């Protein structure tokens, strides 16, 4: 593997580890709460915020992040309220939020000359174009979220969970795209859900890291998009792990 490839793959792999740092514990919590598609919904709502900024001619990094975070937090508050009002159909409401945000985004960029390419970036991500400078603010944000999650984890209110989740998802979408956000959140949690409770977290981290590494290497070798390749590798590892645990 050439030095040029390594200069691209190493920050991409570090990006994956950074995303996993928050998504693995959040994924286990999402799975236990039975709100599997909440990350897709919030990620798509954050993406809608990015699209709104894009169509408004806003391209500065911090302004786009602010638009995405504002949209995601608004979506999180809305879904939290929906959980209180309609707990028996919560998953249906989450699915509806995803579809509405997706459709609104498609309408906004329908007539934009670069709309399809921008939508592809939001969904698939550009993990191979991340550099070290992009990771520093995200690492700080994730560290704050992990500390707050540990301190507020026992809170009776679910609103802190929704808000922290929204901020983590917002940062992740900007790095790796909607599809890889969902895969990083749900698949490692699925891979270990029948394992010993004490081993679930470290094993989920390990499997996620292995998938990112193998996916990046395979994408580089085959000259294919890295994001979808990582998703497929992670799905394969998850399926194998689940089959090993079959009763």
Image (cartoon, rainbow, N blue to C red):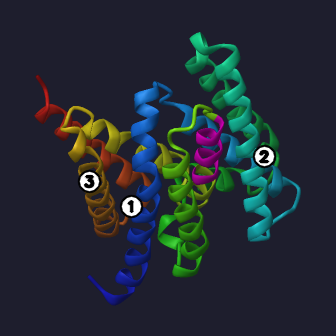
Residue 214 figure quarter: bottom left
Q: Residue at x 78, y 46 (%)?
A: 109
Please state, as top left, top right, bottom left or bottom right, where the C terminus lies in the image. top left
Disc 2 element: helix
**Is 36 left, or right, of 118 in this rendering?**
left
In the rendering, at what x and y percent does residue 163 appear? 65, 44
Q: Residue at x 61, y 35 (%)?
A: 41
N-terminal-most mark, 2 or 3: 2
Per the rendering, the mark at residue 117 is none
Crowding around mark 3 (Cα neighbors within 10 Å: few <14, some 14 to 19, many 20+) is few
Disc 1 element: loop
**Is 120 left, or right, of 218 in this rendering?**
right
Q: Which residues are magenta?
A: 159-168
Q: Residue at x 77, y 35 (%)?
A: 104
Q: Is residue 139 above or below residue 78?
A: below
**Is 62 left, or right, of 129 in this rendering?**
right
Q: Is residue 34 above or below residue 163?
A: above
Q: How many marks?
A: 3
N-terminal-most mark, 3 or 1: 3
Per the rendering, the mark at residue 202 is 3
Q: Which residue is mark 1?
A: 224
Q: Which residue is mark 2?
A: 109
Q: Are marks 3 and 1 in contact (CB under 8 Å)?
A: no
Q: Nearer the viewer, mark 3 or mark 1?
A: 3
Return the residue nearer the eye: 89 or 7: 89
Please state, as top left, top right, bottom left or bottom right, where the N terminus lies in the image. bottom left
N-terminal-most mark, 2 or 1: 2
> How many angstroms separate mark 3 from mark 1 (CA)?
30 Å
> How many angstroms separate mark 2 from mark 3 (CA)?
41 Å
Residue reaching furthest to the right: 56
In the rendering, at what x and y percent does residue 28 appear? 39, 39
Residue reaching furthest to the top: 88
């Amino acid at each position: 593997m050439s030095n040029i490839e390594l200069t691209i793959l190493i920050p991409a792999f570090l990006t994956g580890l950074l995303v996993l740092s928050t998504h693995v514990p959040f994924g286990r919590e999402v799975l236990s709460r039975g709100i599997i598609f909440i990350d897709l919904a919030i990620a798509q709502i954050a993406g809608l915020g990015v699209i709104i900024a894009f169509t408004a001619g806003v391209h500065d990094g911090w302004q786009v992040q602010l638009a995405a975070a504002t949209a995601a937090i608004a979506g999180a508050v809305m879904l939290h309220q929906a959980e209180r009002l309609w707990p028996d159909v919560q998953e249906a409401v989450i699915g509806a939020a995803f579809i509405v945000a997706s459709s609104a985004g498609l309408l906004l960029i329908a007539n934009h000359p670069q709309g399809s390419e921008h939508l592809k970036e939001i969904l698939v991500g550009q993990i191979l174009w991340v550099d070290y400078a992009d990771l520093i603010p995200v690492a700080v944000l994730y560290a704050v979220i992990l500390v707050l999650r540990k301190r507020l984890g026992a809170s009776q209110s679910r609103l802190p969970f929704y808000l922290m989740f929204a901020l983590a998802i917002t940062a992740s979408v900007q790095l790796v795209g909607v599809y890889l956000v969902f895969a990083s959140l749900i698949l490692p949690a699925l891979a270990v859900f029948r394992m010993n409770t004490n081993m679930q977290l470290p094993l989920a981290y390990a499997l996620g890291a292995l998938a990112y590494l193998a996916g990046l290497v395979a994408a580089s070798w085959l000259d294919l998009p890295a994001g979808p390749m990582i998703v497929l590798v992670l799905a394969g590892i998850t399926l194998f792990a689940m089959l090993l645990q079959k009763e």
